[in-house]
Amino acid sequence: MGTLAVEFDSQKIGLDRIKGKIEAIGYEVDDGGYEGHDMGYNYDHGHGHGKPNLGQNNLETVKAGNKFWMALVFGLPLLYFAISDIFKLSVSGVLQNNSLLIQFILSTLVIFAGRSIWKNGIKELAGINPGMDSLIFLGTAVAYFYSIFISLTLLLEIKTGLSSYLYYDSAAFILIFILLGRYLETLTKGKTSEAIKKLMSLSAKEATVIRNGRELKVPLNEVKAGDIVLVKPGEKIPVDGTVIEGYSGVDEKVITGESVPVEKKKGDLVIGATVNQTGVLKFKAEKVGSETMLAQIIKVVEEALSGKAGYQVLADKIAYYFVPFVIVIAILAFLFWLFAGQPLSFAISTLITVLIIACPCALGLATPTAIVMGTGLAAQRGILIKDVNALEKAEKLSVVVFDKTGTLTKGEPIVTDIIVGTKNKIRSKDVLQIAASLEKNSEHPLAQAIMNKSKAENIKLQKVSKFKVIPGKGIEAEINGKKTYLGTRKLLADNNIDVAGMEKRLKELENQ
């Protein structure tokens, strides 16, 4: 199941004709809603590729799995018949006497499981638009019906001169392997769809907007560009916009990967799905709905799934010409051996062999499966592939350049070093105690990192008084009657605290 986006001019073509064209090339259409000149269609076509329909994905995976397992269960006994014939294995009298009927029934059940492939193959041939399904249909249908014909001649003891070898197992296992490939493909698409679902779940469900001087809680889809949005500490920023009032730190790691909150003040941009940490922010909504950065990221993943790599386009072109080419070769082989003086039975066997051997084309199956698998695994690991052609080029890479540390880091800060100035008669353990005592009531990620370190070291915290947060700089407080500062270089410089002797070590750590 996938989604097909179509742009059309309603003055020149109608929905029914578009639907007919889609169905003519082998797709089943489930009409979706459309607006203006944009239309969304869901389609189902074996190994068709489109944007993942998240609501239908689990159902499609279950269906694909049921088809494969049904085909496998009924196909495995056919394998025993084939092996027993080749290696002269013993078969019980009942099975031996009814082997033709049993093989016919088992192969028919396998074909029933893969009937959608036959159905699509017939549609492709009828629409003179041959593809992989039509090639699979030709090979398996010829093997199946030839085997039925031979079975009847054996039962009725009619001598035709044709080989008595049966191809029930060939027809069945070609379909089983194709169904397996498509089942794996739906599983992989499902994992990728789950990654997209997780991205979707990052967004806020509602927003607080200020309209006519009143604060109103509204669903996210009711936020309009130009609305004034209020975000309190701990809340998710609902849409993209520009801060018009307030100061706060915003955790943007869901978008950028950066573990440390980014300071936001008047004039700064805020991104939907990020989390406001400390202060209250008012911002003007500028990008809402499908225009937000999160929506664009989701769109990139979806487009990567629906896109086709160069090799895949090549495979489609090959399939288009390969089907008639195989048919022509099979007919030429038949005529060649017939005019070469071989019996009619030998010429027919050659024709059938060519059609069966040509099915299926590995390139047509392997390429889309590899693309979906690669894109899906990358999405699970946080790598969003904008263009599927990047997958083809990736194997040639020898150097990868990352734009920021947040792309590579764990996503949350930890304390790695505690440096004490040479002039200070204080231990690193005392520094950690003071820092943790000051940060114990803070929700800042750096504060949490310090607290985690102090817990690991079993540090006993001290009583803090006259606690004051200095926005953008740090903390001022008193411990045991002594004024204490914790924060940036700017905070220390403003209070005449000299750190020049530690500057070299500080820069070394920052560069790491």
Image: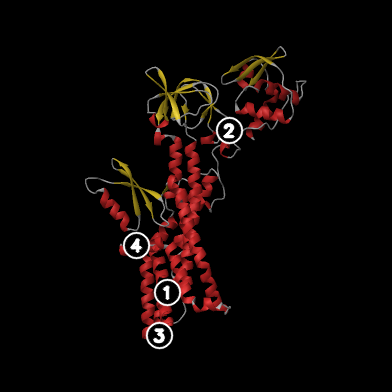
- Distance from the alpha carbon under mark 3 to that under mark 1: 25 Å
Residue at 43% in and 68% down: 108
The residue carrying pointer 1 sits among few (fewer than 14), some (14 to 19) or many (20 or more) residues within 10 Å by Cα, namely some
Q: Which residue position is annotated with label 1?
A: 354
Q: Which residue position is annotated with label 3?
A: 158
Q: Earlier in the sequence, mark 4 or mark 1?
A: 4
Q: Residue 124, labelled with which disc?
A: 4
Q: Earlier in the sequence, mark 2 or mark 4?
A: 4
Mark 4 vs mark 1: give the one in front. 4
The reply to whether callout 3 and callout 1 are in contact (CB within 8 Å) is: no
> Which one is in front, 277 or 267?
277
Is residue 168 visible in the rendered structure shown here? yes
Image quadrant in which the C terminus is located: top right
Q: Which residue position is annotated with label 2?
A: 259
Tell me: residue 509, above or below residue 354: above
Amino acid type of the residue that numbered disc 4 sits on in the rendered structure: Glu
- Distance from the alpha carbon under mark 4 to that under mark 3: 36 Å
Is residue 360 visible in the rendered structure shown here? no
Amino acid type of the residue that numbered disc 2 sits on in the rendered structure: Ser
Tell me: residue 462, above or below residue 361: above
- Distance from the alpha carbon under mark 4 to that under mark 1: 20 Å
Mark 3 vs mark 1: give the one in front. 3
Residue at 43% in and 47% down: 56
Residue at 72% in and 14% down: 480
Mark 4 vs mark 3: give the one in front. 3
